[in-house]
Structure formats: structure tokens, C-alpha cells
Image: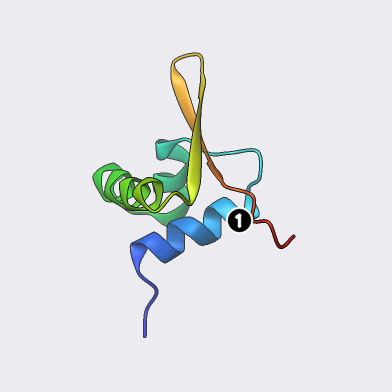
């Protein structure tokens, strides 16, 4: 079964601990920017990511789990 877009975004964020912009994620996964925005909104709602503004951009990071 193919991974959901949300799972794909999670996987990319796990591999890039410095954080990524929406466009970075969109380009890496070859999916539309709007699809990335929806996936990030779901992850933010589930309190799985944090967003850090850097100038005009926003970097999206996976939240640290307490088990690591």
C-alpha cells in the first residue's frame, strides 16, 4: 500500500533535522505545494511538528520525541 502524503512528509522531516520550507518539501516529494500545506496542517494539528520563522520563510521541524 502506498504511503500517504502525510507519511511521506513525516519521513522527509525525519531525515532533515535542520527543517524544511514548504517549497523544499514540495520539490523533494514532487507533489504540489497545496498538498504539502494540507499535510503539514494535519501534522501541526496532531502536535507532531513545530514551525520556526526564519526571515520570510518558515522552517518545519519534526518535534522531538521523549523516547530518543
Residue drawn at point x = 63 percent, y = 48 percent: 16
- State left or right for residue 53 relative to residue 37: right
Give the quarter of the figure containing the N terminus.
bottom left
Disc 1: CA contacts within 10 A as few (<14), some (14-19) or many (>=20) = some
- The correct choice, above or below, for 60 with respect to 8 in the image is above
User: Which residue is farthest bottom?
Assistant: 1
Residue drawn at point x = 47 percent, y = 35 percent: 21
Residue 47 at x, y percent in the picture: 44, 49
User: Which residue is farthest right?
Assistant: 68
Judging from the image, the colouring scheme is rainbow
Give the quarter of the figure containing the C terminus.
bottom right
User: Which residue is farthest top?
Assistant: 55
Residue drawn at point x = 47 percent, y = 40 percent: 24
Q: Nearer the viewer, residue 48 or 1?
A: 48
- The correct choice, above or below, for 47 with respect to 68 in the image is above
- State left or right for residue 64 relative to residue 42: right
Residue 3 at x, y percent in the picture: 39, 74
**Which residue, given by chain and number where applicable, does mark 1 sit on?**
14
Residue 30 at x, y percent in the picture: 38, 54
Considering the numbered disc 1 on the image, is that residue within a helix, a strand or a loop? helix
Q: Nearer the viewer, residue 21 or 31?
A: 21
Q: Nearer the viewer, residue 29 or 62?
A: 62
Residue 22 at x, y percent in the picture: 40, 38
Query: Residue 66 falls in which quadrant of the image?
Result: bottom right
Instruction: Give the mark count.
Output: 1
Amino acid at each position: 500500500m502506498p504511503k500517504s502524503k502525510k507519511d511521506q512528509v513525516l519521513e522527509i522531516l525525519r531525515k532533515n533535522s535542520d527543517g524544511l520550507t514548504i517549497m523544499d518539501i514540495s520539490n523533494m516529494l514532487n507533489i504540489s505545494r497545496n498538498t504539502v500545506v494540507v499535510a503539514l496542517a494535519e501534522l501541526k494539528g496532531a502536535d507532531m511538528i513545530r514551525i520556526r520563522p526564519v526571515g520570510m520563510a518558515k522552517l518545519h521541524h519534526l518535534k522531538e520525541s521523549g523516547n530518543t
